Image: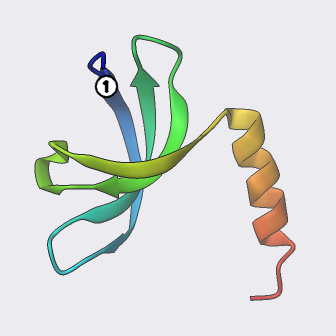
Amino acid sequence: MAEIKYEIKETIGTLSENNKGWSKELNLISWNDREAKYDLRDWAPEHEKMGKGLTLSLDELKELKKILDGMNI
């Protein structure tokens, strides 16, 4: 399997951290030298390992924001 190349362009925020030090973060990431997208996933300390995540374009992130803004929470 080919190595996945990534560069965290901007850290937007951290949602939570578990007892092992992994944190769920929203970041702007360039995957394999492509245009950066918004990415939500778990990261090990120092970002040396990552869990499965969700990658969104800016338009998808805006739609998600509309959905979340419309929730009664």
Residue 26: x %, y % from top left: 46, 52
| 48, above or below 1, in the image | below
Q: Residue furthest front?
A: 1
Write the residue at 14% across / 73% down.
Answer: 20
Asked whether, in this view, residue 46 is left or right of residue 15, the answer is: left
Mark 1 burial class by Cα count in 10 Å: few <14, some 14-19, many 20+: some
Q: Is residue 62 left or right of residue 15?
A: right
Q: Residue 23, located in which quarter of the rendered image?
A: bottom left
Label 1: element kind: strand
Rendered residue at 40%/11% (across/down): 33
Q: Position of residue 17 (x, y in %)?
A: 28, 73
Residue 65: percent from left, percent from top: 75, 58
Q: What residue is pinned by disc 1?
A: 7
Q: Residue at x 55, y 31 (%)?
A: 37
Residue at 53% x, 16% y is: 35
Residue type highlighted by circle 1:
Glu
Q: Is residue 14 left or right of residue 70?
A: left
**Looking at the image, which residue sits at the far top?**
33
Q: Quadrant of residue 29?
A: top left
Q: Report whether 43 appears left or right of 40.
A: left
29 vs 50, nearest the viewer: 50
Screen quadrant of the N terminus: top left
